[in-house]
Amino acid sequence: MTRHFADLRAPEIVSRLTTTSIILQPVGAIEQHGPHLPLSVDLVVAAACAEAVAEARGDELDIWLLPPLAVTKSNEHTGFPGSLSLKAMTMLAVLDDIAAGIAATPARKLVFLVDHGLDTFLMHPFVPPDQGGASPESELGMGIHAGHEETSVMLHLAPDLVDMSLATRNVPEALAANRHVKLGGTTSFGWLARDFGPDGHIGDPTGATAAEGERLFNRSVELVGDQLAEVSQFSF
């Protein structure tokens, strides 16, 4: 049975969606990921994780997948050729318009989105170090973009798109030495990818492996599934 929202025929919207159905919107990006990874990293990971979760727990939790959003808000990567970005207000308008369409169906749980009388949720398949997630010791808690873990996952999901001969370590060690003003510290700060160097990545991809990527991906699918299980039971 399909778990793709767009594959439903009009009469099925009423017959197969209910107030407990979960509509899942994968949100990717088309942005630079250093010299060794493709622009599509975030899109590939978001789409693959959503598909895997729907396959594993779609029937149990009544999950329905919307088509992934490819181009989103990536303005921190402007200045790197190939990075595409919507203005923040443009992206919010797109999300709001999608939510309005979902609000016209019986479904009442939308992961991610806004307004329209829906319970809305935002979740991550991987919690980045700057938001409290783990980071390999070699990255000093700074591996937030195209580093060890993201590169490993891409070696698992799409190895033909990765060129490890171009992978280099780029860890802001001086910043990591700070007590408060650092990625994941108590004092946040604005940044652009180019602030960390000309290649745009932040972390150490040099030791990445497909085996590690498979482990991380499977863990993320389990995490998202567990999050969606709580979403299905959530009520104020």
Image (tube, grey):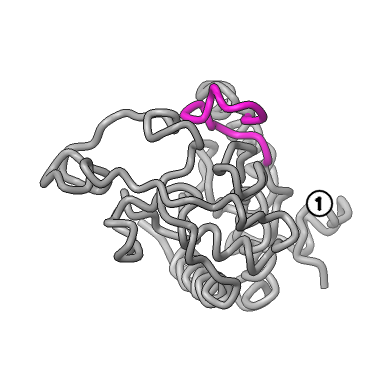
Please tell me how crowded label 1 is: few (under 14), some (14-19), or many (20+) other residues with Cα within 10 Å: few
Between 235 and 87, which is closer to the camera in this rendering?
87
**Does the magenta run of residues contain 236?**
no
Range covered by the magenta-colored residues: 70-83
Q: Position of residue 172 (x, y in %)?
A: 30, 43
Can you name the residue that lies furthest to the left here? 179
* Visible residue check, residue 23: no
Between 116 and 57, which is closer to the camera in this rendering?
57
Residue at the (33%, 54%) spot, across then down: 129
Q: Identify the image quadrant of the N terminus.
A: bottom right
Residue at the (67%, 42%) spot, across then down: 69
Image-based side of 26 in relation to 136, left or right: right
* Visible residue check, residue 157: yes
Residue type pointed to by label 1? Ala
Above-or-below relation of 157 to 44: below
**Does the magenta run of residues contain 77?**
yes
